[in-house]
Image: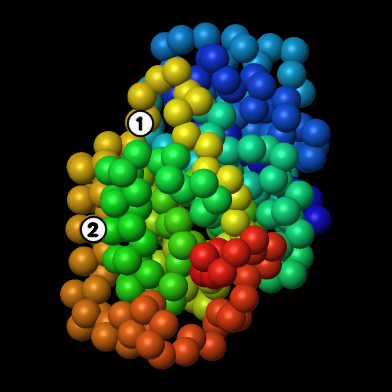
Amino acid sequence: MRVAVVIPAFNEATTVAEIAERALRYVQTVFVVDDGSDDDTAAQLLGLPVTLIRNDTNLGKAGSLARGFAAALEQSMDAVITLDADGQHRPEDIPRLIEAAAEYPGDIVIAARLEGRERMPRSRRFGNWQADFWIAWAAGYPIRDTQCGYRLYPAALLERLVVRDGRRNSFVFESEVLIEAARIGRYARSISIDTIYGRSPRESHYRAASDTMRIIRMVAGKLFRRGMYPLGLLRSLGLLPHSGIARSEAGAKSPDALG
């Protein structure tokens, strides 16, 4: 399987080189998308065998991911792994995502932050719980850690999906992907990973209140257009079976990892 890693980075000079180097231990192709940084993010990558894509202006995470996906597809990759540049995702888990992808070809693999989740601030845990509830309802099956950007996407799925990637959709994009993938019969499989929080020297770009509300509005619009999708709600709560998802997930360390 030919796998590329895409790392969106906005003002990540402190950590981006280390993350890229560690990712290169597991894959040969790494794209770093510098999202209009005004620090030394790009300079930190000099001498590393990575492909640097630079946005002239800040496009947001969604726009950066879209550019990274396009570059990977141009090189005929079979799958794309996305991970953050701030050190909250361990590149050492890349082989586990690839292993799960081999077991569930065609589906998305989420590295769900389920181990040591208490390290996450309470406000973020609450926001993530809210997002999980709404997105699982709209997708029609249970999904854990819908807000984690550490994922593997099959190239064939990326070629089919049409999802908005404007700057206002920066943190909506990854949620909408899960819903739209479910509509064409592709689902999210979870592997359980450690929660790493607070390593980055900067504040998170995610704004718990405003970005969570954008996600909820996106999901609500989709639900209204489907008559509130009552079957999806029942399936997302586990009250009705969903044939597309197995009862156990690949690589799960605990029952909480079930997707």
Q: Is residue 200 above or below residue 228?
A: above
Display coloring: rainbow
Q: CA distance from mark 2 to mark 1?
A: 18 Å
Q: Which residue position holds label 1?
A: 205
Q: Which mark is drawn over residue 192?
A: none
Check disc 2 and give the amino acid type.
Ile
Mark 2 touches mark 1? (CB < 8 Å): no
Residue 112 position within the rendered picture, expressed as x and y whole percent measured from the top left: 53, 54
Residue at 45% in and 67% down = 143
Residue 215 position within the rendered picture, expressed as x and y whole percent measured from the top left: 27, 54
258 horizontally vs 139: left or right: right
The tag earlier along the polypeptide, 2 or 1, is: 1
Q: Which residue position holds label 2?
A: 216
**Badge 1, how many Cα within 10 Å: few under 14, some, many 20+?**
few
Residue at 64% in and 27% down = 19
Residue 85 position within the rendered picture, expressed as x and y whole percent measured from the top left: 55, 29
Q: Is residue 130 above or below residue 211?
A: below
Could you say whether the residue bearing mark 2 is in a helix, strand or loop?
helix
